[in-house]
Image: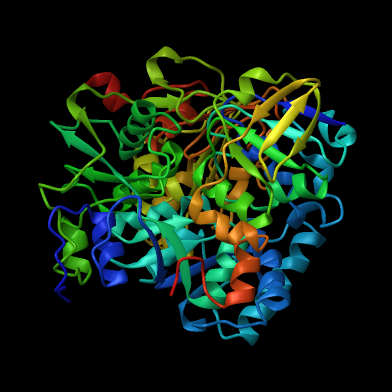
Amino acid sequence: MSSKLDLAGLTLAERILSVRAAKRVTKGELVVLDIDQVMVVDSIAADVIRIIEEDLDGVIRHPERVAVVVDHVAPAANVEVATTQKQLRDYARARALKLFDVGRGICHQVLIEEGLARPGWIVLGSDSHSTTYGAVCAFGTGMGATDIALAVASGRTWLKVPETVRVNLRGERPIGVAAKDIALEVVRRLTAEGASYASIEYHGTEAFSRSERMTLANLAVEAGAKVGLVPPSGGVLEEYDVPDWLTVDPEADYSKVLDIDLAGLQPVVSVPFFVDNVQPVKEHLGTPVDQVFIGTCTNGRLDDLHIAADILRGKRVADHTRLLIIPASSQVLEDAVSDGTFASLLAAGATFGTPGCGPCMGRHLGVLAPGEVCVSTSNRNFMGRMGSPEARVFLASPAVAAATALSGVLSLPEVVKNA
Amino acid sequence: MARVWKFGDAVNTDDILPGKYAPFMVGEDKFQRYAFAHLQPEFAANVQPGDILIGGRNWGLGSSREYAPRALKKLGVAAIVAKSFARIHYRNLVNLGIPAFLSDTVPELLTDGDKVTYDFISGRIWRGDEEYKLPPPPEFLQAALAEGSILDYYRKHGRFPGES
């Protein structure tokens, strides 16, 4: 697909929105646009259905563009949740929406696996981490129930064209420095509101796998961003049809440029209770840890489980520590079973949950008690996020999480210690 | 007279309504009782309809959960004045018709527990003899707010503001 528009000097976000608007638009302009995919999760389903049915005459403009995912408390933890999930399931079937039920996985992982987020698409999700779709250079962004209901009903949404923060990743990445560490460094440098209302473009990412790109784009929202776009390259170019207009213009107008020297990075943690409170792991070594959680849309993929298994294989989780692993999707779980990763982790003492969001927002499957400390590969460590407001959550990479599970205290993996 | 409830910077959506107390978890009739359950445990039981909230920078960061501001709406919160708002949360406030004002000065000048009166149409708050001006909402939202909310605008016109 080519475009006759003049896109010179436009950022990736401006290009996607201009092509869809069929006119050149730049930062600050308001646009109303057709969208390619809307994603609805269980936790807000009742609101979305109510608004569509009561306020919007039950209209669904493009049912084939709506994906419904049961993941936020899956399987249901109580009767209230079960009732909403039943309502959503029945509604999806009656209205011919794509339904991904309990156990299929976390919404963002499922949409990527199912090809429902593609380069150049506009994808709206009823979850803030919908920035994840930027991993394949889709304009993915999160919205609340009313916006999502309007999008489902009308097939459109209104957006302000964002300015763009360009992040340049330079230099060689040291062994043991994960995409998670890099993504958290971006959040630390920008702060939790440093990219508010903006698009983040991640450059220097040619060698990053799709999974690593998902980690980067996922955490864009923790700097306040509307979208986090990774320019198509490498495996993404091979796997997807990338429109020829979806390219980086070196002359594009960026509101801010952030250079990060990868060679200078080391494993980090987000120290409670703020995601942008990012500090070197080595400053917190030895902190006793009650629970380690490996999973979520940030870091629950096969490569994350491989990293954990490589650290834990043939060893045992520390006596006073629980290791909880929740694969991001049924596909990840199947792959981990068939390649032996699952067995290695199980033998090391890991416990497994149904693919889904798990305890990330403190609802079930690993909620924390007062005074407990958790090292988690997830994306938020706010007060009370995973249970008690007196529990503390450190966000970390899968490697740091696995090393911590082994020792029972916040630890660096051997590969880092020996480097 | 309305009470001012003052909060600091970076009040996130888990602060406003912890995930475990979503209507999805505890029921549509009960969830508002848990507004600020961790951050300000006495809030939900004591807030009165018409009270206003004051925040610092980046109010509402985090989750897209619209039920967080919806809990505040159910409790009768009349407006939120903050130095800046997180993007998704700001859309949610507009969609719910909760007046959200951006101001660097008002959050500094008002204190927790202040008794105030206000007129949000003209954008003014009074504490005793003192008057504080609030900036009007962004122009592009005024068309929607004139109809109540974006949803109301769409229902009436069959299109979004600014769309031909």
- Image check: A169 left or right of A369? left
Q: Quadrant of the C terminus of chain A?
A: top left
Q: Residue at x 18, y 25 (%)?
A: A263
The x, y position of residue A105, in whole percent, is: 51, 61
The x, y position of residue A321, in whole percent, is: 58, 29
Q: Residue at x 65, y 53 (%)?
A: B66
The x, y position of residue A289, in whole percent, is: 57, 24
Q: Quadrant of residue A178?
A: top left
Q: Residue at x 69, y 48 (%)?
A: B98
Query: Which residue is nearer to you in this view: A159 or A181?
Result: A159
Q: Above or below — where is A99 with respect to A289?
A: below
Task: Kindly tell me whether residue A218 is visible in this rendering.
Answer: yes
Total number of numbered discs in the rendering: 0
Q: Quadrant of the N terminus of chain A?
A: bottom left
Task: Kindly tell me whether residue A369 is visible in this rendering.
Answer: no
Query: Which residue is nearer to you in this view: A27 or A401?
Result: A27
- Image check: A299 left or right of B143? left
The colour scheme used here is: rainbow
The x, y position of residue A416, in whole percent, is: 28, 24
- Image check: A192 left or right of A88? left
Query: Which residue is nearer to you in this view: A176 or A280?
Result: A280
Q: Above or below — where is A321 with respect to A2?
A: above
Q: Quadrant of residue A336?
A: bottom left
Q: Quadrant of residue A220?
A: top left
